[in-house]
Amino acid sequence: MTALVWLQYALYFAILVLAAVPLGRYIARVYEGQDGIARRVLGPVERGIYRLAGIRADEETSWKQYALCLLAFNLVGALFVYLIQRFQGYLPFNPTHLPGVRPEIAFNTAVSFTTNTNWQAYGGETTMSHFTQMAGLTVQNFLSASTGMAVAITLARGFARRSTATVGSFWVDLTRGTLYVLLPLSLFLAGLLVSQGVVQTFDSSATVSLVEPQVDASGQMITEQILPLGPVASQVAIKQLGTNGGGYFNTNSAHPFENPTPFSNFLELMAILLIPAALCFTFGAMVRSPRHGWILLATMLALLVPLVVLCAATEYGGNPALVGLGLDQAAGNMEGKEVRFGTATSALWATVTTASSNGSVNSMHDSFTPLGGLAPMWLIQLGEVAFGGVGSGLYGLLMFAVIAVFIAGLMVGRTPEFLGKKLDAYEMKMASLVILIPSAAVLVGTAMACLLPDVAAAAPNPGPHGFSEILYAFSSAANNNGSAFAGLDAGGRFYTVALGICMLIGRYWVIVPVLAVAGSLARKPVVPPSAGTLPTDTPLFVVLLVGTVLLVGALTFIPALALGPIVEHLRFAVAAGGVP
Amino acid sequence: MNMLQFIRTLISLLLLFSVLFGLVYPAVMTGFARLTFPGKARGSVISVNVIEMGSALIGQPFSRPEFFWGRPSATTPQPYNATASAGSNLGPLNVSLNERIIERVAVLRENDPGNSLPVPVDLVTASGSGLDPHISPAAAFYQVPRVARLRGLPEDRVRRLVEEQIENRPLDLFGEPRVNVLLLNLLLKRMAEKE
């Protein structure tokens, strides 16, 4: 790794933090209903939506009703996306006359986009019409992201409020998040992406000549190349900002029409972590303790940065299995990577997209070296709390904070309190559910897939790498990431259904306990800090929190990782002529 | 909250958002793109003498030795099939990755017998999209002697052509230096036709 690489990484994180601070404060003002530029422009739209939908903006609900609204809205949204896909053959904006999507793929995709996972069991350019991409998928990109933010904001309110029975209005939170946060940022980003060459048109495709006509396997002359087009920039912008990650095309942000230049790549990378980072400061502003925002962000960075370095260093090492074939591997392990991004940017993207629950890719993780691939996989398995999804990362990490406070309390005999709220058995139980449920879904799902011979055979790579592909798939689904070791043929009935169920569990069985904690905290009074209170705004607490996340992540997943990437790494070392 | 009111809110909110984010937002962006970057919005197509000769962003297959070759492509059924982007997704220890690379190195050596330099890795590994338009400058320079010999051009002229086509890192910082194979070959063709 050269100095240039280090400088590139340092600059990326520095700009990220600089942009996140003001955005975070702005988001807090949005949800508190204060005036701003966006509100002056889009305020009439907000009020119009409330009038047409019969929503009273000042009517708050209990956490149970909040959860009910959220679940019902997500259910209706998923049904809508399912039906659009099934009937896309009869709907407009289908220039290539694609037929309705198969039921299990449509189920998987509908679940995938409403849960903010954006796992793709289909190839975009060959399966989905423009109408499905816009009215189905792009819409859910906005709504699932705003749903996640709403839950995080509700939890922040739980900490901020005193002795209150209500936690907010889901309809209002949902509307404000989309209108004032996601929409303006998406318009801005999409505009910049178009300037870089990301396509944006309602035309279906363009046909161009090949400079050197080719003869295909059956002896036919191929003289033309068909370029698929579509309203891509508008979808790519929100897919990155909303930590969705579902690409317009099969190869996602490795595709030149989604990510044509190093600058577009930098913008998209920034967009992936921007809102998750900003929400730390939103939280700090809402609980009137900006220091806690910094503590959360420092924890996220402390989890992510070492894994970025691990990934980049191993990818730069190249592939020892290719030594002796007469190659110059100075550029690193280039299988599955694009030249314009190279190893440095690909490794940064792979770890950033898995630390957040984004899951878009600009290189093929399946072809990474074993430890290079372990870094993204483990970041997913840590529960998507190092940045995580928009909203979901923050509430995930706050649940870990509840556990950390409790563990520390047990160790040194302190009363478990966080931000002046006393934490009881109820909060502990809910936090444990949030952490255990997705992990169980990953491990049980992987075990099931391995026990079914036909299903295990869908992993095309032999040996431990095939196991890694299956483990990665379930980790990605149950933690709502959406990236893949994409060699796995996940289009069959078992994977579409099993992964769909994992996505549902990993999303809603987490959201409901989080809302329960929000409701319970909002009801509590604030206790003034005493001599027995553990301070939670110090570097020591960052260490505790990082330790808790790593401990849970390591204990839960190292046995499984040992069977996949770690075994593969040992074989790798043999190929390199190292350890026998 | 009564049931009817609840259902009305659910359905109307979903429909309103679908219109706003599913139709208005993409339509506004499409209008903006058509006004500001009409060429880029429609795929950066390059025209040579009125013929649309490919996109500056999407690679094309080259296999004749008098052209510069791009990255191997894993798309099916033919390489550089832009309607179905794909990477190989072969694991690093997969035997067929090894076999494919040995074969590609052999083809390079066969077409350029005098050249025993190490082969730049990007020239024999499949790209992520299968449509990568670029190769590294090293991979382009590696091919200069072969192309110059087969085209009957002086080596330093071909080398200069490559040097002129190198796109550097923006701000000397992000991404990697690279050469667009399609643009390079179009220029090469024009240069050879002028001779």
Image (spheres, coloured by chain):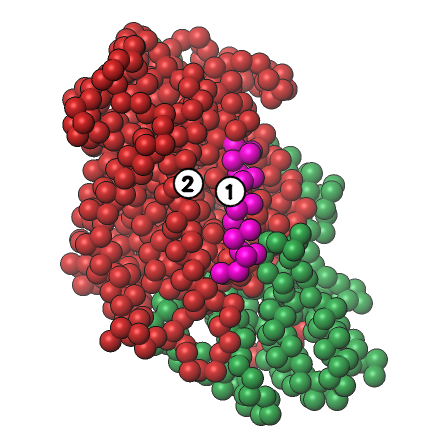
Chain colours: A red, B green
Return the x and y of residue B77 as percentages of the image width and height.
Answer: 48, 70
Residue A388 magenta-drawn? no
* In this picture, residue A111 sits left or right of residue A52: left
Three-letter amino acid code at disc 1? Phe
Q: Residue furthest right?
A: B194
| Secondary structure beneath label 1 | helix
Q: Residue furthest front?
A: A531
| Secondary structure beneath label 2 | helix
The chain that hosts pointer 2 is A
Predominant secondary structure, magenta span:
helix
Residue A497 appears in view:
no
The answer to whether residue A547 is above or below residue A254 is: above
Return the x and y of residue A123 as percentages of the image width and height.
Answer: 44, 55
Q: Which residue is mark 2?
A: A301
Q: Which residue is mark 1?
A: A13
* In this picture, residue A465 sits left or right of residue B105: left
The chain that hosts pointer 1 is A
Return the x and y of residue B131 as percentages of the image width and height.
Answer: 55, 64
User: Counting residues from the N terminus, which is met first, the one under dot 2 or under dot 1?
Assistant: 1
Three-letter amino acid code at disc 2? Leu
The answer to whether residue A76 is above or below residue A494 is: above
Return the x and y of residue A45 as percentages of the image width and height.
Answer: 57, 19
Identify the residue at horizontal 76%, vertical 86% (top origin).
B153
* Quarter of the figure with residue A214: bottom right
Identify the residue at horizontal 42%, vertical 24% (top origin).
A291
Tell me, yes or no, whether the two marked residues, 2 and 1, touch with CB atoms within 8 Å.
yes
Report the span colored magenta: A1-20
Residue B113 appears in view:
yes
Q: Residues within 10 Å of mark 2 (few under 14, many from 20)?
A: some
Q: Do marks 2 and 1 share a chain?
A: yes
Q: For this rendering, which residue is in front, A118 or B106?
A: B106
